[in-house]
Amino acid sequence: MRTIQFREALREAMSEEMRRDPSIFLMGEEVAEYNGAYKVSQGMLDEFGAERVIDTPIAELGFAGIGVGAAANGLKPIIEFMTFNFSLVAIDQVINSAAKIYSMSGGQYSCPIVFRGPTGNAGMLSSQHSQNFENWFANCPGLKVVVPSNPYDAKGLLKASIRDPDPVIFMESELMYGDKGEVPEEEYILEIGKANIVREGKDVTLVSFGKMMKLLYTAADELAKEGISAEVIDLRSVRPIDYDTLINSVKKTNRMVVVEEAWPLASISGELAYMVQRRAFDYLDAPVIRITCADVPLPYAPTLIEASLPNVARILKAVKEVTYTAA
């Protein structure tokens, strides 16, 4: 099987869907002439033309609103935010328009739109450009929120998101665009809302999504050296959440550690911890531990960034606490 970059997988997903359906178009800052801020849309302007790959001004509220209006009138927009930090400027269109059209129209109108772009920390970008809003959007009924962790999932989930009749928030990472992985040449689509057990284990369940999955893989390898068998679950989407896969895993391992690149209050990890104690309390042999960002705006200094974010050492410490193997 061939190996391609994360950005290439996203580009293939969009291009294949645009060839299949002429109602799909891509709109956002620098997506056309510049080939995308992170080169995700490289070459798409040449293939599809300026009517379907559209550069916008720096006006997220405006072009998000154009996308919502287009979706309500039969088109299928892909709206790229250069970063989801900038989606806050457009959040009224996302929350009060896109997410509510179906409900407020009594099912007469749908809003088949995808809002996509990078999320989270990407280095020394400081407080206003390093935030995670997965839990913000997941809190809103009417939205789906997808966070892929590898090129294979990125392509299959983006194709599913584009075909979905409802608005989808599709969150990527600047630090993952160059990641490589195996992606089939033949068409495939992944189900939104179905988690992936990427590694089976018996002693503890490790759960995350997006680029935090890299930490889980490293931690699981380190734990295996010490005789601790970790089951690793990639949620893939945080609305809907595949609770059944999670609960069944905890019933087997009796312990759970959740890793999330977000602030702790009202986080996805808090929701998972609640649901596990609600549905699998009698199976737990230790309290659920959450590993999140520090409850502060992300600093600029590299040493403070490292201290603020989840890391492998924190995961190993948490696992040893829940398995009662800490020194």
Image (cartoon, rainbow, N blue to C red):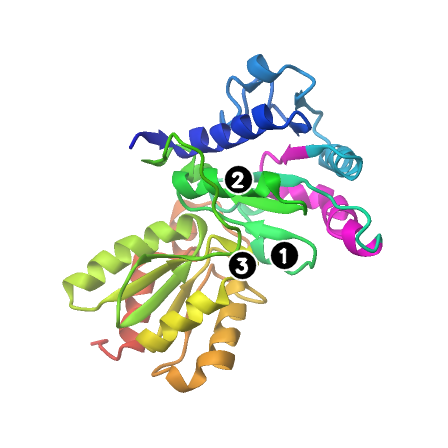
Q: Is residue 99 magenta?
A: yes
**Which quadrant is the N terminus positioned in?**
top left
Task: Report the front residue among 305 and 235.
Answer: 235
- Mark 3 or 2, which is nearer the eye? 2
Name, please, the residue furthest toward the right.
105
Quick one: label 3, few (<14), some, or many (20+) residues within 10 Å? Answer: few
Label drawn at residue 296? 3
Quick one: label 2, few (<14), some, or many (20+) residues within 10 Å? Answer: many
Residues at marks 3 and 1, CA–CA distance in whole angstroms: 17 Å
Inspect the image, locate mark 1, and give the three-letter code of the amino acid beneath it: Trp
Task: Report the front residue among 252 and 301.
Answer: 252
Q: Secondary structure at mark 3?
A: loop
Q: Quadrant of residue 291?
A: bottom left
- Mark 2 or 1, which is nearer the eye? 2
Disc 2 target residue: 158
Q: Residue at x 65, y 34 (%)?
A: 79
Disc 1 target residue: 136
Q: Residue at x 51, y 80 (%)?
A: 278
Q: Secondary structure at mark 1?
A: helix
Inspect the image, locate mark 2, and give the three-letter code of the amino acid beneath it: Leu
Quick one: label 1, few (<14), some, or many (20+) residues within 10 Å? Answer: few
Name, please, the residue furthest toward the bottom.
282
Which label's residue is closer to the chain start, 2 or 1? 1
Look at the image and give the residue range highlighted in magenta.
77-104
Q: Secondary structure at mark 2?
A: helix
- Mark 3 or 1, which is nearer the eye? 1
Residue 157 placed where, x, y %?
Answer: 50, 43
Residue 37 seen in the figure:
no
Task: Report the front residue among 29 and 249.
Answer: 249
Task: Report the front residue among 261 and 280.
Answer: 280
